[in-house]
Image: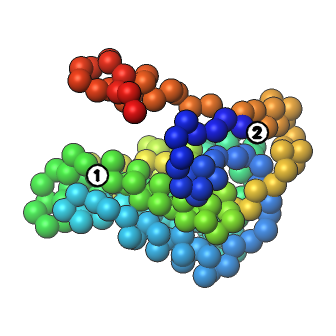
Amino acid sequence: MSSPTYPIAPLLEQRWSPRAFKKDALTLQQIGSLLEAMRWSASCFNDQPWQVIVGSREYSPQAYQAIFNLLVPFNQTWCTPVPLLILTIARERFAHNHQPNPHAQHDVGMATTQLLLQAAGMGLSGHSMAGFDAPASYAAFNIPTNGEYTPMAVTAIGFQAPAEALSDAGMRERETAPRERNPLHSWAFGNTWGTGFTA
């Protein structure tokens, strides 16, 4: 496993996106804590533009199945045992003045990060996916089609299983491969664009 170049909080280093999950159910208390972490995320004007559909196999099975059906076949393959699927949606206009919010999707991403970090802190794992049928989400959940809501991602949450739980050899190999990150100088710039910042 690759190590950070500079020290970071242990929780940040701990978080990653596995595909091997156990079937173990989450409690309502655990799900509540995950959602609460999103609720306390920062956002522009404190607008909190995230909306979510909570698909719990135990507590909202209809929503769970509907979200699962939106996933591309590859993601369905490894998501079968996952007990919790959360569809995140961005509300694209500010609540206080109904003007376009160009930061809404950014803020949904921040809230999702807090969800993933909360999961890691609880001994759970999370994996966010872009591989789902976003257009079909509108009909599946009666999301308004007035252009004010954008389905963003589906996040799987559960207890991590050993890589051997995955039936596909390629997925098992990816599960155990070293975690790679782009070097700081390739994206953290200093005085001019493209010139790496030196810490």
Residue at left offset 23%, top offset 24%? 191
Circle 2: element type = helix
Total labels drawn: 2
Residue at the (23%, 57%) spot, across then down: 44
Q: Whole-percent x and y of residue 69? A: 63, 51
Using the rendered view, name the quadrant where residue 59 is placed.
Answer: bottom right
Q: Which marked residue is nearer to the observer: mark 2 or mark 1?
A: 2
Amino acid type shown at disc 1: Ala
Residue of label 2: 175
**Residue 46 or residue 181, whichever sits in front:** 181
- Real-space Cα separation, disc 2 to disc 1, in angstroms: 32 Å
| Residue 117 drawn at (x, y percent) | 54, 59
Residue 74 image position (x, y, % from top left): 69, 37
Disc 1 crowd, CA 10 A, few/some/many (<14, 14-19, 20+):
many
Front residue of 44/59: it is 44
Q: Sequence-wise, which precedes: disc 2 or disc 1?
A: 1
What is the crowding at mark 2: few (fewer than 14 residues within 10 Å), some, or many (at least 20)?
some
Q: Quadrant of the C terminus?
A: top left
Place residue 195 in its image quadrant: top left
Work out whether residue 59 or residue 144 is closer to the camera in this orientation and state it: 59
- For the N terminus, which image quadrant? top right
Residue at 54% across / 70% down in the picture? 34
Circle 2: residue type: Glu
Q: Residue at 35%, 27% (x, y): give it.
A: 197
- Residue carrying label 1: 104
